[in-house]
C-alpha cells in the first residue's frame, strides 16, 4: 500500500519547512536511506531521507514552497497505485487536532527516552534502525568509507539520529572515545541576574556625536612606530630638575602642536562646502570619567611651554572628574589626542572628534628590539595611529604630519626650539 511522506520536525523550533530542491522525481525508484529532497528549516538546510521503498508516485510540494510540520509532501508506493484515493482518505481520517496530538506524543516520547533518572549522564547511543542497519545518508556513508571511519562510532545529528555529511566531516576519533564513556557532571546551582543602568545625558551626547562622526566622515588610518629612547631619557633629565613633573602625554601634546604648525591641513575642519584652515592650534585631550569621555582643550598649545601644558592638563583633568568643566573648557578643539598607553594598550584606533579632521590614538611605550647602527639592541617603541577624515586630509598629508611628529619625538630637543 502507498505510504504518505510528511514534513518531519527537524529542529525543536521548526514549524514549517521549505523544499529547497527535490533530488528524486516522480517515477523514480526509491530505496530506504535514499535522500528525497533538501529541506530548509529555521536553522539549517537538511536532507530528507526516505524510510520506505517503492516508486515515488506523487510530489505535492514544488521547489521553493513551504509546508507545515506533518504536512503531506509526497507519496511512495507500488507502480500503478491510485494515489488520489490515498490522499483523500488521509485528509479525511487525519484531522488537524489528531495531527497535533501525534506530534506532541512523539516529542514527549523522545524526551522520555533522553532522561536518565537521578544522575546527569552523557551517553552516546548508536543510530541503529529496526533492521539493525546504521542510519546514514549516502553521502555520509561514502565519505566515511573514504576516511576509514566506523559509522558505529559517529553520533548522528540528523532526523532520528541519522548520520549526515557534516557529522563525518566534524568527526574526531578522540572525541568519540570520550563521548562514548559515561561522564557524571556536577550539578551547578546558579541564577541569571543583571542591573539596568539609565543612560546619562553625557553618554547620550557621546553616542550621538561619535555616531554622526563615524558615519559622515570617511575615516582612514595611518599607523607609525616611534623610537622613544631619547624622549625617555630627556623626560627623565627634565623631571630631575623641574618642580613640575612632565608626562609623556605633555611632550606628545607639544610635539603635535609643533607639527600642526607645519601641516595646517591636519589642523582644519569642514564647514558645509568650505574647508576652514585654522591658524590657531587648540588641542583636545580625551579624559575618561565615570559617565564617559570628556575632551577638555589646551588652547594655543604651540605657544605654551611643557610646564604650562602639564599644569593645564592636570587642572582640566581634575575639573573633568569633579564635573566642574565649563563649555569654554571643552569647545573649540582643532585636533584631538587620545592616549591609552597608561592602561597598557599598545595600539588602537579612535573616532574623529566633532569638527576636527584628525585624531591621534597613542599607545604605550614598550621595550622591544630595534636595529641601531646595524646591530640589534633593546629600545623603547611607541605606536601611534591617526584617524583622518578623507574629505579634508589625504594619505600623503597625514603621512607627512606623522613623519614630522616622529622626528620631533625621536629628537625632542627640537620641540623646545
Image (cartoon, rainbow, N blue to C red):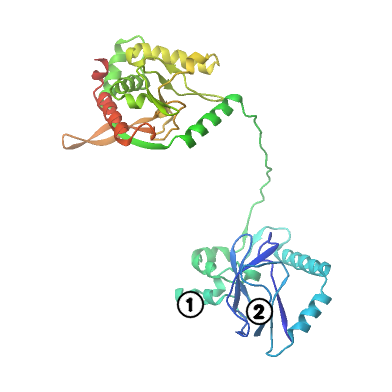
Screen quadrant of the N terminus: bottom right
Q: Considering only vertical position in the picture, is 182 above or below 392? A: below
Instruction: Pick out the residue farthest to the top.
Output: 243
Q: Considering only vertical position in the picture, is 249 above or below 102? A: above
**For this view, does 41 lie left or right of residue 111?**
left
Give the crowd class for mark 1: few <14, some 14-19, many >=20 residues within 10 Å: few
Label drawn at residue 145: 1
- Residue 392 locus on image (x, y percent): 37, 31
Screen quadrant of the C terminus: top left
- Residue 181 locus on image (x, y percent): 59, 64
- Along the line of sight, the residue nearer the viewer: 335 or 321: 335
- Residue 385 locus on image (x, y percent): 36, 33
SS category of the residue bearing label 2: loop
**For this view, does 293 lie left or right of residue 116?**
left
Q: Considering only vertical position in the picture, is 328 above or below 269? A: above
| N-term mark: 1 or 2 | 2
Q: CA distance from mark 1 to mark 2?
A: 22 Å
Residue 177 in sight = yes
Q: Which residue is depicted at the point 58% across and 68% down? A: 155
Residue 53 in sight = no
Label drawn at residue 51: 2
Amino acid at each position: 500500500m502507498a505510504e504518505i511522506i510528511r514534513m518531519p520536525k527537524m529542529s525543536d523550533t521548526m514549524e514549517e519547512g521549505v523544499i529547497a530542491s527535490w533530488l528524486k522525481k516522480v517515477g523514480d525508484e526509491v530505496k530506504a536511506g535514499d535522500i528525497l529532497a533538501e529541506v530548509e528549516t529555521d536553522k539549517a538546510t537538511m536532507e530528507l531521507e526516505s524510510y520506505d521503498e517503492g516508486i515515488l508516485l506523487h510530489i505535492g510540494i514544488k521547489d521553493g514552497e513551504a509546508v507545515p510540520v506533518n504536512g503531506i509532501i509526497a507519496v511512495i508506493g507500488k507502480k500503478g497505485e491510485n494515489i488520489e484515493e490515498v490522499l483523500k482518505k488521509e485528509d479525511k481520517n487525519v484531522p488537524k487536532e489528531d495531527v497535533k496530538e501525534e506530534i506532541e506524543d512523539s516529542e514527549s516520547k523522545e524526551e522520555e527516552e533522553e532522561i536518565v533518572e537521578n544522575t546527569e549522564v552523557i551517553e552516546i547511543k548508536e543510530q541503529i534502525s529496526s533492521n539493525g542497519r546504521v542510519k546514514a545518508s549516502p553521502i555520509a556513508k561514502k565519505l566515511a568509507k573514504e576516511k576509514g571511519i566506523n559509522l558505529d562510532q559517529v553520533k548522528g545529528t540528523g532526523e532520528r539520529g541519522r548520520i549526515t555529511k557534516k557529522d563525518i566531516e566534524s568527526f574526531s576519533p578522540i572525541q568519540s572515545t570520550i563521548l562514548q564513556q559515561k561522564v557524571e557532571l556536577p550539578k551547578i546551582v546558579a541564577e541569571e541576574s543583571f542591573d539596568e543602568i539609565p543612560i546619562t545625558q553625557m553618554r547620550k551626547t557621546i553616542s550621538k556625536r561619535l555616531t554622526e562622526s563615524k558615519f559622515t566622515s570617511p575615516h582612514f588610518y595611518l599607523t607609525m612606530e616611534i623610537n622613544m629612547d631619547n624622549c625617555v631619557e630627556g623626560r627623565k633629565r627634565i623631571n630631575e630638575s623641574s618642580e613640575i613633573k612632565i608626562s609623556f602625554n605633555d611632550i606628545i601634546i607639544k610635539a603635535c602642536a609643533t607639527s600642526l604648525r607645519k601641516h595646517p591641513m591636519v589642523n582644519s575642519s569642514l564647514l558645509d562646502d568650505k574647508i576652514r584652515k585654522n591658524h590657531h592650534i587648540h588641542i583636545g585631550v580625551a579624559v575618561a570619567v565615570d559617565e564617559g569621555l570628556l575632551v577638555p582643550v589646551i588652547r594655543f598649545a604651540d605657544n605654551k611651554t611643557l610646564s604650562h601644558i602639564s599644569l593645564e592638563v592636570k587642572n582640566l583633568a581634575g575639573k573633568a572628574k569633579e564635573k566642574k568643566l565649563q563649555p569654554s573648557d571643552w569647545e573649540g578643539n582643532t585636533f584631538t589626542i587620545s592616549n591609552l598607553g597608561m592602561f597598557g594598550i599598545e595600539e588602537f584606533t579612535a573616532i574623529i572628534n566633532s569638527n576636527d579632521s584628525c585624531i591621534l590614538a597613542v599607545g604605550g611605550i614598550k621595550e622591544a628590539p630595534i636595529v641601531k647602527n646595524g646591530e640589534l639592541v633593546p629600545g623603547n617603541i611607541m605606536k601611534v595611529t591617526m584617524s583622518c577624515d578623507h574629505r579634508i586630509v589625504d594619505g600623503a598629508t597625514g603621512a607627512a604630519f606623522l613623519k614630522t611628529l616622529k622626528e620631533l619625538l625621536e629628537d625632542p630637543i627640537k620641540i623646545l626650539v
